[in-house]
């Protein structure tokens, strides 16, 4: 059951679902006729209590608030509001919240959308409602591939970019046989499929795979199968606490000491920090952003740190970028009407702390450089959040699929 509280949605009967709001001021006075409900409303819908809570969670909400502040809290005289909710990694809960936001609370766009099954469900509903979604927390490349919509965007990374980075690098370095330990839902399937293509394209071979439930606690049987495969690389096609738990338990079985390499195909700064350098050292991973890349990213990281006590990862920085880009598009359009904003989102370059010269393709994919990192050894780190060594920069055009490669039916129809 969905209840309304304070003019915003609460899934009160669904334990753990929460919602908060940050407003840029009172209802706009004058000149606000172009804005529905006299406000620009953005929903941040993600996991705030489960295995992906550190991955995005309240950190993404805070990043969204930072973007609103950087736009001055309003577009002209029209206030900007941020609503938040916990979807508990369940597509049905996410869809119920999204529907209520659109129908009752006047939300213009929904963002973050951690968990691929959730993102696919909400993006599909948003097409029906003619509303914009910008996914920063889910990975499946299907969002701008076979499941693309006119109003769906994918911002920070996707499974193909992760595969090109980590999968390509490890295969070329001699890790030419792979076994996948895969989360059993849309994201895991997409990540395994995209990485397998890259492995094979680089002369490698996939010798097997095994699926595990989401939010799994005991990886012993899965790891023993991976160990028994004798594959040089065990690809962890999962994320969040699932990846952390798999890595911890792999150490108990001496998998790395036995000569096999673990590939954390989606592992962010938050999870590395939580795992600690003693366990995570030497991992190769791909991210779309790192706080210690340059003076601009360091300044943003320190600003975020003062608010949250943590450094942002690529999902949180990507959410800042997505919200800022959406608001710039609203400002350029002079309205929150979906088609007008949609046209501006596709036309404007992405130029912010997350990406400079980012380009939004016709399929909704934002193309930007990705980065291959190695996790530092404890002796190499100069501080709590000094965790990565940059191995290489992957140009956006290499990392991401072009519209003609993506499989998006919209781009095929446009030919």
Image (cartoon, rainbow, N blue to C red):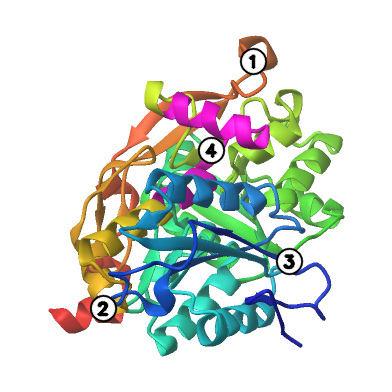
In the picture provided, is 50 more to the left or to the right than 334?
A: right
Q: Which residue is mark 2?
A: 339
Residue annotated with mark 1: 383
> Of the residues under marks 3 and 1, which one precedes in the sequence?
3
The residue shown at (68%, 70%) is 87
Q: Nearer the viewer, mark 1 or mark 2?
A: 2
Q: Are marks 4 and 1 in contact (CB under 8 Å)?
A: no
Percent from the top left, x then y, of residue 121? 54, 80
The crowding category of the residue bearing disc 1, from other C-alpha atoms within 10 Å (few below 14, some 14 to 19, many at least 20), is few
Instruction: Give the Cα distance between marks 4 and 1.
Output: 20 Å
Q: Quadrant of the C terminus?
A: bottom left
Quadrant in the rendering for residue 402: bottom left
Q: Which mark is residue 285?
A: 4
Regarding mark 4 in the picture, which secondary structure is present there? strand
How dense is the environment of label 2, judged by Cα within 10 Å: few (below 14), some, or many (20 and up)? some
Query: What is the C-alpha distance between the residues marked 2 and 4?
Result: 37 Å
Asked if the residue at tag 3 contacts the one at tag 2, i.e. Cβ–Cβ closer than 8 Å, the answer is no
Does the CB distance between marks 3 and 1 fall below 8 Å?
A: no
Of marks 2 and 3, which one's residue comes earlier in the chain? 3
Specify the segment rendered in magenta: 297-322
Residue 232 in sight from this viewpoint: no
- The answer to whether residue 17 is above or below residue 13 is above
Q: Which residue is mark 3?
A: 18
């Amino acid at each position: 059951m969905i209840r309304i509280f304070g003019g915003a949605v609460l899934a009160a009967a669904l334990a753990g679902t929460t919602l908060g709001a940050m407003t840029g001021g009172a209802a706009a006075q004058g000149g606000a006729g172009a804005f529905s409900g006299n406000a620009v409303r953005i929903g941040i819908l993600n996991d705030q209590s489960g295995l992906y809570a550190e991955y995005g969670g309240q950190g993404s909400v805070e990043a969204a608030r930072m973007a609103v502040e950087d736009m001055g809290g309003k577009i002209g005289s029209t206030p900007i509001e941020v609503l938040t909710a916990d979807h508990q990694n369940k597509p049905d809960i996410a869809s119920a919240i999204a529907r209520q936001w659109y129908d009752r609370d006047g939300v213009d766009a929904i963002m973050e959308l951690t968990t691929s099954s959730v993102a696919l469900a909400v993006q599909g509903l948003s097409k029906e409602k003619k509303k914009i979604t910008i996914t920063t927390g889910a990975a499946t490349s299907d969002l701008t591939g076979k499941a693309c919509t006119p109003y769906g965007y994918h911002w920070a990374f996707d499974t193909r970019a992760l595969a090109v980075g980590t999968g390509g690098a490890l295969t070329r370095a001699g890790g030419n046989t792979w076994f996948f330990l895969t989360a059993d839902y849309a994201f895991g399937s997409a990540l395994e499929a995209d990485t397998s293509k890259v492995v094979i394209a680089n002369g490698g071979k996939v010798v097997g795979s095994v699926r595990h439930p989401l939010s799994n606690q005991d990886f012993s049987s899965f790891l023993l199968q991976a160990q028994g495969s004798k594959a040089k690389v065990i690809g962890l096609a999962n994320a969040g606490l699932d990846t952390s738990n798999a890595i911890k338990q792999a150490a108990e079985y001496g998998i790395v000491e036995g000569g096999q390499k673990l590939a954390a195909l989606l592992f962010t700064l938050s999870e590395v920090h939580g795992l600690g350098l003693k366990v995570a050292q030497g991992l190769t991973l791909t991210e779309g952003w790192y706080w210690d890349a340059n003076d601009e990213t360091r300044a943003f990281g320190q600003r975020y740190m003062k608010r949250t006590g943590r450094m942002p990862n690529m999902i949180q920085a990507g959410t800042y970028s997505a919200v800022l880009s959406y608001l710039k598009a609203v400002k350029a359009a002079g309205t929150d009407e979906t088609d007008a904003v949609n046209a501006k989102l596709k036309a404007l370059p992405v130029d912010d702390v997350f990406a400079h010269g980012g380009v939004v393709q016709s399929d909704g994919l934002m193309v930007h450089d990705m980065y291959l990192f190695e996790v530092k050894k404890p002796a190499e780190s100069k501080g709590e959040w000094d965790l990565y060594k940059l191995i290489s920069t992957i140009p956006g055009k290499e990392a991401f699929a072009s519209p003609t490669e993506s499989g998006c039916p919209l781009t095929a129809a446009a030919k």
